Image (cartoon, rainbow, N blue to C red):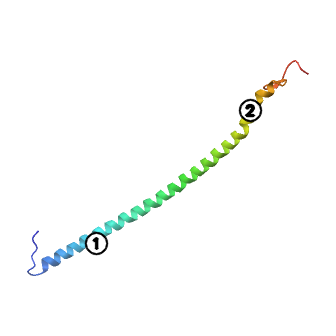
Amino acid sequence: MYVSYCCGTTLEAAMGSLRDELACREADAHTQAEELRNRIDELKQQLAAVEERLTRLRITRETVDGVLAETVPVAAEAPERAGEGEAVGGPSLGRA
């Protein structure tokens, strides 16, 4: 690129153009930064919702595990009692 310095106008024009270009790039970067901040806010909201769902699922699983832990031994005892005079599901027939 050829730049003439004889009158200074070409250099001034080039500097002005450079300043305009820098201002344009700065404005673009500012816009991109704002868009990214907005996207980060959206992602934070999505993350909070998913973490809440995860917490509820963990609580549900722990509750189900607790209920199953309490009921499994009772169900396992039922066949043993069947030989004590009652069939599983009701009293034996033949006894009063």
Above or below, 23 against 96 in this view is: below
Rendered residue at 78%/27% (across/down):
80
Q: Is residue 70 left or right of residue 7?
A: right
How far across and down, in percent of the image, does residue 91 sit? 84, 24
Considering the image in quadrants, where does the N terminus appear?
A: bottom left
Give whichever of 6, 95 is nearer the camera.
95
Amino acid type at image mark 2: Ala
Query: Mark 2 = which residue?
Result: 75
Give whichever of discs 2 and 1 has the lower sequence position.
1
Q: Residue at x 31, y 69 (%)?
A: 26
Q: Position of residue 32 (x, y in %)?
A: 36, 63
Q: CA distance from mark 2 to mark 1?
A: 77 Å
Q: Secondary structure at mark 2?
A: helix
Q: Residue furthest top?
A: 94
Quarter of the rendering containing residue 30 = bottom left
User: Residue pushed farthest right?
Assistant: 96
Which marked residue is nearer to the observer: mark 2 or mark 1?
2
**Residue at 61%, 48% in the rendered image:** 58
Q: Closer to the camera, 38 or 92?
A: 92
Q: Quadrant of the C terminus?
A: top right
Give the percent coordinates (x, y) of residue 73: 73, 35
Image side of residue 41 versus residue 33, left or right? right
Q: In the rendering, at what x and y percent does residue 2 appear?
A: 9, 71
* Label 2 close to label 1 by CB (< 8 Å): no
**Numbered marks: total:** 2
Q: Is residue 58 left or right of residue 37?
A: right
Instruction: Identify the residue at horizontal 67%, vertical 45% (top origin).
Output: 63
Q: Quadrant of residue 88 in the image?
A: top right
Q: Report the side of 33 relative to 75 (left or right).
A: left
Q: How would you rate the neighbour count of disc 2 (Cα within 10 Å): few for under 14, some for 14-19, many for 20 or more? A: few
* Residue 23 numbered tag: 1
